[in-house]
């Protein structure tokens, strides 16, 4: 409830609209009270024995009143719906904006635990539930309360005893409505969750369609989706069954209370205690009371959905930022000296990915992290980018803890090439510049250094070619080279390459190395690799295993040491000579 109120407060400067909506609501309810009172006078004039001319005058006046009320009520209802719905939509628009801004700023640890499908359903369905809750649901609740209270007062003023008799039927109606909402509320919550599951299954299958097809998982995935879909259908059916049962019961009870008003009213008329017109007014009042009571279940359920939605929305908005951001953040050009001081780090699952890692990378030098898969290399790059903060120890750049550097200043001065390169559905140029204002000459320079000029020249629109979702139109190696061009574009003082030559053939890799060597001058470079060939020219090679450093030194030193690196070198050189042979054979037979 607290969260829904927080959402409601988003409309701060809209009190004028709210007051207009309130006036509209009052007018809507007032109409329901006034109409039976006017018709009462008409009926009473029929039985009053007045001369015909007077009866006709009453009829004419009442007709004019009724038309005037209908017109005024129409305008007021329009204002009420327009402004209330406006408020709801304003809130959902703002909430989506806040949510998306938050999603973009959330730390990586958040995405390790939250599914994309879940986030999508929060951004759409839950926000919609909040919109309804703060829009028409709240409006109907208020109108119903106004109507209920107003009509009750009017009835009590007309005849207290008859009012009590008519009200005798309401507790049964109220109980059924309440019971219905208790039953249907959780069902709707299940439906919301199930819809999230369906979303996730569909989304994962669409994103991973290539894996699904490659492993011929279509049948199993189809079955999984069908069973989720069936559960969704069954829940929908249960809800429909419950509401189709509840509606006729409510109608029946409504008819009964109308009948009670008519019978008891009739008796009072015969006794001469009330007029015929008052009896008719009572049956009309009883009729207009049915709606607020009937709506209790439905509205409370919609309201519960809005409360649940607001909670899920604010769970994301309030998600704790695990990154510490101190007040005085340093903004200045980076020189390029990096030091890891006894750094340890565990992901959300608690297992230590990096343990007591210490490494100094002098300004302008090239260091290569080498190690088996899962040894913690990417984790080191993630920590340097401050995607996560170390659990223990510290990382410094130019002697200053990276927690004290301004985050965007830090990230804009480090060029990252990630292992998993994501390309947006935009032109190659936009993918390289990522919104940065740079000269075309600089883009061409970066493209050339990244060895991407040849394949880009072959594309129909060159740099302006739009690449599909996840860059499907490009090969793995081509995507990697675009990512390299993106990273080196502005010549940042620090460069981090995570396995960025893994998808390249040896020739392209050699060219790339040559081009990059020039770029490496005067820059601090951290290369993450699995191939010794990528590592051997580095100033320092660091071999990692299970999150720790097992060997460290230059290529020569490590070979002399005859340890893990030397072993890797031997194995990979053997493979390499086989590969070179194969490549030579292929180039000898170009048609193969
Ligand atoms: N987001 C994550 N959440 C939980 N554990 C993770 C996450 N990312 C990596 N790990 C775990 O941390 C350890 C180190 O992973 P890391 O990605 O740093 O390895 P790597 O050396 O880069 O491997 P590779 O050569 O295959 O890229 C692994 O055991 C991995 O399972
Ligand atoms: Mg990795």
Image: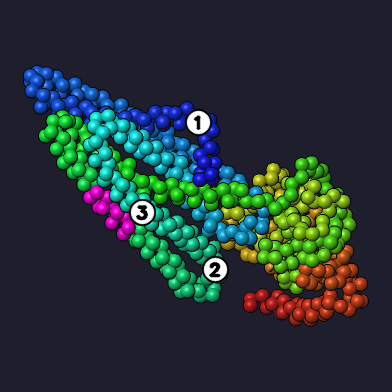
Q: Closer to the camera, 363 or 106?
A: 106
Ligand 1 rendered quadrant: bottom right
Please give the residue where the numbered disc 1 appears in the rendered image.
14
Which residue appears at 11% of the width and 18% of the height? Answer: 54
Locate residue 282, reporting x and y percent: 22, 35
In the figure, is residue 164 to the left or right of 58?
right
How crowded is the residue under tag 2: few (<14 C-alpha within 10 Å), some, or many (20+)?
few
Query: Of callouts 2 and 3, which one flags the residue occurring earlier in the amino acid sequence?
Result: 3
Q: Closer to the camera, 497 or 65?
A: 65
Which residue appears at 24% of the width and 49% of the height? Answer: 253
Please give the residue where the numbered disc 2 appears in the rendered image.
210
Confirm if mark 3 falls within 8 A of ligand 1. no
* Secondary structure at numbered mark 3: helix
Total residue callouts = 3
Taking the magenta stretch, the answer to whether it contains residue 174 is no
In the figure, is residue 245 to the left or right of 195?
left
Q: Closer to the camera, 583 or 572?
A: 572
Residue 412 seen in render: no
**Image quadrant where one finds the C terminus:** bottom right
The picture quadrant where one finds residue 356 is: bottom right
Q: Between label 2 and label 3, give the one nearer the viewer.
A: 3
Taking the magenta stretch, the answer to whether it contains residue 242 is yes
Where is 227 relative to 362, above or below?
Answer: below
Q: Between label 3 and label 1, give the one nearer the viewer.
A: 3
Locate residue 582, reporting x and y percent: 72, 79
Please give the residue where the numbered disc 3 appears in the rendered image.
179
* Secondary structure at numbered mark 1: loop
Where is 181 relative to 359, above or below?
Answer: above
Residues drawn in magenta: 241-253
């Amino acid at each position: 409830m607290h969260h829904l109120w927080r959402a409601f407060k988003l409309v701060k400067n809209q009190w004028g609209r709210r007051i207009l909506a309130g006036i509209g609501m009052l007018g809507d309810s007032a109409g329901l009270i006034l109409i039976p009172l006017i018709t009462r006078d008409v009926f009473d004039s029929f039985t009053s024995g007045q001369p015909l001319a007077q009866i006709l005058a009453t009829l004419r006046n009442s007709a004019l009143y009724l038309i005037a009320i209908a017109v005024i009520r129409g305008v007021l209802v329009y204002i009420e719906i327009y402004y209330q719905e406006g408020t709801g939509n304003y809130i959902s628009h703002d909430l989506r904006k806040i949510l998306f801004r938050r999603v973009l700023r959330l730390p990586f640890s958040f995405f390790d635990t939250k599914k994309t499908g879940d986030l999508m359903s929060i951004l759409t369905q839950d926000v919609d539930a909040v919109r309804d809750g703060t829009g028409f649901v709240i409006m109907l609740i208020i109108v119903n309360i106004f109507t209920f209270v107003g009509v009750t007062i009017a009835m009590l003023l007309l005849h207290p005893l008859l009012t009590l008799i008519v009200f005798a039927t309401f507790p049964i109606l109220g109980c059924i409505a309440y019971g219905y909402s208790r039953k249907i509320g959780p069902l709707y919550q299940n439906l919301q969750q199930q819809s999230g599951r369906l979303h996730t299954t569909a989304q994962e299958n669409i994103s991973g369609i290539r894996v699904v097809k490659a492993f011929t998982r279509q049948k199993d995935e189809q079955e999984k989706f069908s069973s989720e879909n069936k559960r969704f259908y069954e829940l929908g059916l249960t809800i429909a069954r419950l509401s189709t049962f509840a509606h006729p019961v409510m109608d029946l009870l409504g008819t009964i209370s109308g009948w009670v008003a008519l019978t008891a009213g009739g008796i009072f008329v015969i006794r001469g205690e009330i007029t015929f017109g008052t009896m008719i007014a009572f049956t009309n009042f009883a009729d207009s009371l049915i709606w607020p009571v009937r709506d209790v279940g439905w509205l409370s359920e919609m309201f519960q959905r809005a409360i649940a939605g607001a909670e899920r929305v604010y769970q994301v908005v309030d998600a704790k930022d695990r990154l510490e951001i101190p007040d005085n953040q340093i903004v200045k050009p980076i020189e390029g000296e990096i030091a890891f001081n006894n750094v340890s780090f565990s992901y959300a699952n608690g297992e230590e990915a990096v343990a007591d890692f210490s490494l100094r990378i002098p300004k302008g030098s090239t260091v290569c992290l080498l190690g088996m898969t899962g040894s913690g290399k990417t984790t080191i790059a993630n920590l340097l980018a401050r995607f996560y903060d170390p659990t223990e120890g510290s990382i410094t750049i130019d002697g200053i803890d990276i927690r004290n550097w301004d985050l965007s200043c830090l990230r804009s001065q480090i060029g990252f090439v990630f292992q998993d390169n994501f390309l947006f559905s935009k032109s190659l140029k936009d993918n390289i510049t990522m919104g940065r204002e740079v000269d075309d000459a600089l883009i061409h320079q970066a493209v050339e250094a990244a060895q991407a000029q040849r394949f880009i020249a072959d594309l129909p629109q060159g740099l302006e070619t739009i690449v599909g979702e996840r860059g499907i139109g490009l090969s793995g190696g081509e995507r990697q080279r675009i990512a390299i061009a993106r990273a080196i574009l502005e010549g940042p003082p620090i460069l981090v390459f995570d396995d960025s030559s893994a998808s390249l053939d040896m020739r392209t890799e050699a060219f790339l190395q040559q081009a990059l060597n020039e770029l490496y001058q005067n820059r601090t470079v951290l290369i993450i690799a699995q191939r010794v060939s990528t590592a051997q020219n580095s100033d320092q090679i660091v071999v990692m295993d299970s999150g720790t450093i097992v060997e460290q030194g230059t290529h020569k030193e490590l070979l002399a040491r005859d340890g893990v690196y030397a072993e890797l070198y031997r194995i990979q050189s053997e493979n390499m000579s086989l590969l070179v042979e194969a490549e030579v054979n292929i180039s000898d037979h170009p048609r193969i």
